[in-house]
Amino acid sequence: MEKEIVLEGIKDILEILNFRESINLKVKKLLFFKKNIEKYKDDFLIIKNICIDKNVPILEISRQEFLKLKKTVNSTGIFLILGMKDYEGIEIEKILAESEKVLLLYNIQDPGNLGTIIRTAGLFGVNSIIIMGKSIKLSNSKVLRAIKGYFFGTKIIESKDDKFIFDILKRLDYKIFVADIGDDSLDIRKVDFTFEKKAFLFGSEGKGFQDFNFDFDKKFNKNIKKITIPLECNNYDGSLNLAVSCGIVLFEVNKYGRNAKINRFKE
């Protein structure tokens, strides 16, 4: 399935048009309301020429259509229509069956963090990302701006049923590593990440997993490990930025391929 996103605002439209298209996001058409674009004719000409070069359809809309689409009082009358892949059911199960490295993002609120994590995950070869809980939407213009088009073929799923996702992970025998600062968490430098299928769960910036209310059965619990990043500064009472933490964990994981010979666990 595919859902439509209406993007408004010259800066956002230009940034999206300069992105490379991906498996997650497609530019479908450019719409404009002639009466309003007089004030923005130079910007509209630039946008129009980019759309012509990219073979994006350009359509004039009526006043009635304009009023339905506009989200701001002083609308430019220029709208970019995007198609975003919306994965469901069997599609999600197929993606996870074909993936080896998955990111689970629970209740992420900051658009900059989400965009940075998506870019970082693509660079470190994450196959799929699942946005869970009450996280900010991928369609948020600030998120799209932070991603800067760098999806790198990573499939991004917005979960409608988190229990369904965990049921699939359980069935596919995923090892789940939960990023947590608790005393019972394992130092990431001493964790074996060489499993064929692994998922990394990160909680919200402010609350972590305070709202996380999933009870797993004992068998599945054996597949779940808490991990933490050791900090060298003893006097520091804060925590790492979420996107930074994600990058550090993925870097550590990537140092050791699934078939690599490692001796890091020998004391």
Image: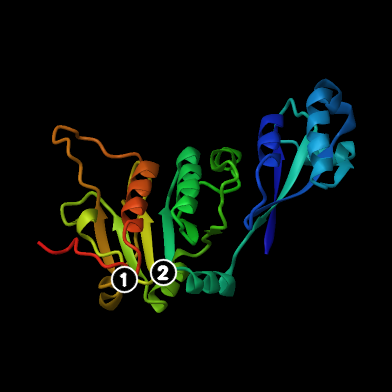
Image point 62% across, 56% down: which residue? 24
Q: Secondary structure at mark 2?
A: helix
Residue under the image location 37 percent in, 66 percent down: 198
Q: Is residue 95 above or below residue 83?
A: below
**Tag shown at residue 216:** 1
User: For the residue marked with disc 1, what is the amino acid?
Assistant: Phe
Seen from this angle, which residue lies furthest left?
267
Q: In the depicted view, which residue is nearer to us: 116 or 68?
A: 116
* Location of mark 2 (residue): 166
Disc 1 to disc 2: CB gap under 8 Å = yes
Label 1 SS: loop
> Please, what is the three-letter code of the amino acid marked with disc 2?
Phe
Left or right: residue 112 versus residue 141 is: left
Q: Position of residue 48 (x, y in %)?
A: 83, 35
Q: Residue at x 42, y 73 (%)?
A: 167
- Identity of the residue furthest to the front in this view: 261
**Looking at the image, which is closer to me, 246 or 170?**
246
